[in-house]
Image (spheres, grey):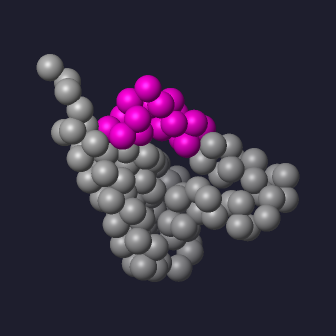
Amino acid sequence: MLSLLMGLSAGATSAAQIGDRGQLGRVVVGALVQLPAVWVVTGIAVAAFGLAPKQIVIGWIALVGFVLLGEFGALFSLNQTVMDISPFAHTPRLPGGEFSLVPLVALTAIAAGLMVAGLAGFRRRDVG
């Protein structure tokens, strides 16, 4: 929901500044294609909590690591293989880039697998 609201806000601002109403839709789509990568980060946190609850910090480490890779990876000329560790490196660069459904489906499948693993681990634990 937050991605949608941010996309709407940024899109409306951009559309008003340049006078192109079509910019609103392009920016909203650009924000929404990031959701599968966000789900992967959430899946990592859920898997850590369900499978190794004392290691829940893994979710935070993954988030910080992915943000640092995205922000500073190109600045430090890191190898593309290292940059590809981040799920955000696989999402289409919209607006302006080329849309591809394959990485979004793959990221969604990875996120679903992590969620299932985490929830299965949580169900095995004695929480009561």
- Near-viewer residue (104 or 12): 104
The segment highlighted magenta reads: 48-64
At which x and y percent is residue 17? 52, 53
Look at the image and tell me in which quarter the N terminus lies.
top left
Q: Is residue 85 placed above or below 97 in the rendered structure?
A: above
Q: Is residue 4 visible?
A: no
- Near-viewer residue (105 or 121): 121
**Residue 65: quadrant of the picture:** top right
Q: Is residue 53 on the magenta stretch? A: yes
Residue for point 41% across, 71% down: 106
Dominant SS type (magenta): helix
Look at the image and tell me in which quarter the C terminus lies.
top left
Residue for point 53% across, 59% down: 87
At which x and y percent is residue 9? 40, 45
Q: Is residue 17 left or right of residue 46?
A: right
- Near-viewer residue (95 or 124): 124
At which x and y percent is residue 53? 38, 30
Q: How many marks?
A: 0
At which x and y percent is residue 30? 45, 62
